[in-house]
Each structure stands twice: as structure tokens, then as C-alpha cells.
Amino acid sequence: MSNSAPGMSVHTLGTGGGPIVSSSRAGTSTVVCVDGAAYVIDCGMGSIRNYRSSCAWSDLRGIFLTHHHSDHVYDLGSFLVTGWQVPGESFSRPIHVFGPGRPQRIPALDQEHAAQVDERTAGRTMAGTVEVVDALLDRVFASDICIRMADEGREEPHNWVVAHDIAIPDSVPADPVEARHPAMDPFEIYKDELVTITAILVDHRLCYPAFAFRVDSAYGSVVVSGDTAYSENCIRLARGADLLLHEVMDLDAILATFPDGPTRDGIEIHLRESHTSFEEVGKVAQAAGAGRLVLHHIVPNTPGAADLQKIKAGAAKDFSGPVQVAEDNDCFIIASTPSLSAPREEAEVMA
């Protein structure tokens, strides 16, 4: 299915948060469509099936990874290989993949914690997006690719998939230990004739770098928060956006799904300091002056564990605009006619 309609729309391919297998929601993934071109943000588990319900492989131009937690990259390899020269189901141009580069060291809370991390990780290293894509094409799917090149006459896949590590501007004093999300201005990472995509660092505890993205077009603007606690940087990026697609968590509800014990205690700290609660997310949208707030990356993602009405009401308490909790395969129309400032009343949702 090709999404060739003119205008700008947002399709929630996956709205669940966390690395679990859920029967109710696919893993977090979003596609922003502009005049038939598709820009995917994150590739959670099961999202590739929903992508093909909304778009064709020929629509895809780029994939943008907010960070490298597994629940945001599970389907990345599927996106890259499935559209590679399949008759009638193929990329129409090289696909560009943008995501975090390799940090100079494993992130930590402070220097004392950094020493503990070094001991715990025992010489392990992280990887940048270029390394991740190379590993998928040259190692994980190496046998499949070689056989298909030999047997079906396909071209070198690197001609069709081009990876980029997002370079944080030199003027930003970012550091994986001392400053994982310093105050900064958004910076451009991608531009074509239809969209400009900018990024900013957000607060996802030890996950560094972690980005939020903004997509601007002639029809309007969309911001995807990525995973983050309450973030002044995210507010800055989302200033005046037509639609803010933001993660949300009910901490008590997710903790209720875990058994008591040291592991539960450790993940509680991570969750509390890495994500935005339903009691805070409306404040983000209000401070940014966003036109509409859509909640996704729902935590907990266990079927029936999240009280969606409570989450929506908590967000709406502090935000004067419309609020919706997204489901998989929702489609939000930003505008169907070009405007440098798309009227907010044109935004609508089609489930």
C-alpha cells in the first residue's frame, strides 16, 4: 500500500513501550508521511507489519533512531533487508539511516559510578549506528544477502542502505558522564525537498546519546520525544509544533507487573528517572505551546495493565489542547494543503 496522498500525516506503527512481547501493542515506531514520502522514527518489535499497512517500500526515504535500546531497534534489520530489491516491493532510492554514534565511553551517573560501570561491563563497548547497520548487513544477514546476490542477481545492499552517526555539534558540551543532555539548541540532521529534520538531546538516564526529533514540512510540524524524562530540551524542540508525540508512563502500574526483589528495585530507579509520567507529560506540551498532544510508547505495555483513561486525564489536566492516547495504526492528519504554518484546527485523527 503506497501512501501517495498529498499532505502530511503521522502513522503510529507501534505504541507500546519496553522490551516485552505484547499481544496488544507493537513496539514503538512512527512514520511521518509527506506527499508520499515516508520517514520512520524507531523500529520496535512488530512495527514492520504495520508499516506495510500504511506505506510501500518505494515510499521510504529514511529511518531515524532516537536511541539504541532494544525496543526501539528490534525490527531495524527487517526494515533494511525486506525492501532490498524485492520485485514490486523494493526501495525506490537509497534509504538513509540516522541514529546515535558510539559514545567515547559507556555512560555513567558520575565518575565514581563510571568506575563501577567499567568493572561491571568488563571491557564491553557500545556501537554507533553505522556499526549497527554494517553488522546487520555484513554479519547478521550475511548468508541471506550473499545467497540472494548469487542466486537472484541482487546488487550490493550498501548501495541501497546508507547509515549515518548523528554528530552532536562541537559547540554542545555533551559528555556521557558529566553532561548527557546539556541545554542546547536543536540542530539539523536531514533535509530534502519535502522535510527538514532536527534533533536534540533528551534525558533518558544512562542512555547516551538519546534524541528527540522534529519533522518540519510546508504542511506543519511533528515532534517525537523519544524516551525521556521531563526535558527542557524536548520543550525547546517542540516549541509551536502542530503535534507532539510523547512517551508516557504509569510507574505504579508497571511496577505492579513485576515480582518483588532486587531486580524490581533496580528497574524502578531506571523507570522513574528515564521516563515521563502521565502526571508530567501535559506540562511538557503546555510549556512547548504544542497544538496537539498524542501519547505513545505506553508503559506498562502488558495487555490491560495501563489505565488509559487515567493517563489521558492526567495529561489533560496541565495541557489546554487536545490529548489522545494512540493505538497501533492510528493516523493523524496534520494538513492536506501546504502552509508555512498549518492551521491547528486542520489536525484530526483517523483510527
Image: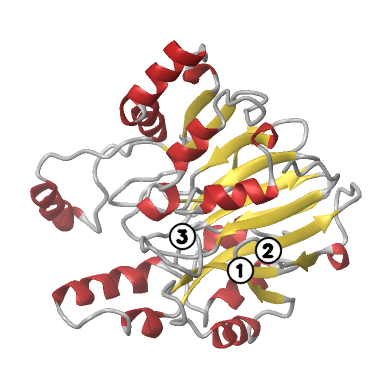
**Is the residue 60 above or below the residue 49 in the image?**
above
Left or right placement of residue 217 versus residue 154 in this view: right
Q: Quadrant of the C terminus?
A: bottom right
**Is the residue 269 above or below the residue 182 in the image?**
below
Of the pair 167 and 276, the residue shown nearer to us: 276
Left or right placement of residue 40 versus residue 207 in this view: right
Contact? badges 2 and 1 (CB < 8 Å): yes
Which of the labelled discs sits on residue 327, or is there none? Answer: 1
**Residue type at the position of mark 3:** Asp
Instruction: Name which quarter of the figure residue 253 lies in.
Output: bottom left
Left or right placement of residue 342 versus residue 298 in this view: right
Residue 8 % position (x, y) = 79, 50
Residue 128 % position (x, y) = 36, 35
**Residue type at the position of mark 1:** Glu
Of the pair 178 and 97, the residue shown nearer to us: 97
Contact? badges 3 and 1 (CB < 8 Å): no
Please name the residue shown 41% across and 31% down the image.
Answer: 133
Q: Which residue is mark 3?
A: 227
**Residue type at the position of mark 2:** Asp
Q: Give the structural element (helix, strand or loop) at label 2.
A: loop
The Cα–Cα distance between marks 2 and 1, rounded to whole angstroms, is: 6 Å
Q: Which residue is mark 2?
A: 330
Is residue 242 visible to the viewer in this orientation of the structure?
no
Q: Give the structural element (helix, strand or loop) at label 3.
A: loop
The Cα–Cα distance between marks 3 and 2, rounded to whole angstroms, is: 20 Å
The Cα–Cα distance between marks 3 and 1, rounded to whole angstroms, is: 18 Å
Of the pair 160 and 150, the residue shown nearer to us: 150
Of the pair 178 and 153, the residue shown nearer to us: 153
Residue 312 % position (x, y) = 61, 82
For label 3, the crowd category at 10 Å Cα-Cα, with few meaning under 14, some 14 to 19 and many 20 or more, is: many
